[in-house]
Structures are given as C-alpha cells and as structure tokens.
Image (cartoon, rainbow, N blue to C red):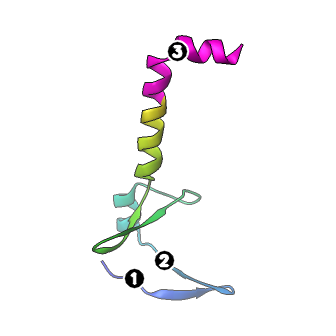
Amino acid sequence: MRTKVTQIGNSLGVILNKELLAKLRVGKGDTLYVVETPDGLELKSYDQGFVDQMETAEKIMREDRDVLRKLAE
C-alpha cells in the first residue's frame, strides 16, 4: 500500500485509508508504534517489547508471590 506525506496544520502526516486501519485494527485516538527493523520501519498497533515486559512481570509476580507480599509489608 502507498500513502503520501501531507500537510496537517503546521505538521506533516500521513492519511491511513479504511483498509489499512482495518488491518491494523485501530481507530481514531488509538496509539501506533513505529519500530525500526533491518528491513526498514514497521507500523504496529501495539508495542511487542511492552507486551514481553508485562508477561515477564506477571510470571515473576506469580512465582514470587510470597516474597513480594513480604516486601510490601
């Protein structure tokens, strides 16, 4: 898919068509992430790094529940 850079007020931006919005599963007000990869830039509807960090934190909280409870006292 192609899109052009356009003037939006004093800034520049791109317009995402309905098809692209549907593929990203995003709408007005949602956050998109630009990730640099060896192949270029990727536009994503979520931050995989954050998801990975949260999964790791949840695993630690499950495994060390008793330790964390003691630390909270």
| Residue 59 position in % (x across, y down) | 42, 26
Q: Position of residue 61 (x, y in %)?
A: 50, 22
69 magenta-colored = yes
Foreground: disc 3 or disc 1 = 3
Taking the image as shown, residue 37 lies to the left or right of residue 32, namely: left
Q: Which residue is mark 1?
A: 3
User: Mark 1 packing: few (<14 Cα in 10 Å), some, or many (20+)?
Assistant: few
- Hey, what amino acid is under mark 1? Thr
Q: CA distance from mark 2 to mark 1?
A: 7 Å
Q: Which residues are magenta?
A: 58-73
Give the numbered dot on residue 65.
Answer: 3
Mark 2 is on which residue type? Ile
Nearest to the observer: residue 73 or residue 1: 73
Q: Amino acid at mark 3?
A: Arg
Q: Residues within 10 Å of mark 3 (few under 14, many from 20)?
A: few
**Disc number placed over residue 62 in the picture, else none:** none
- Residue at 62% across, 13% down: 69
Disc 2 marks which residue? 15
Callout 2–callout 1 Cβ contact below 8 Å: yes
Q: Nearer the viewer, residue 63 or 46?
A: 63
Q: Is the residue 47 above or below the residue 73 in the image? A: below
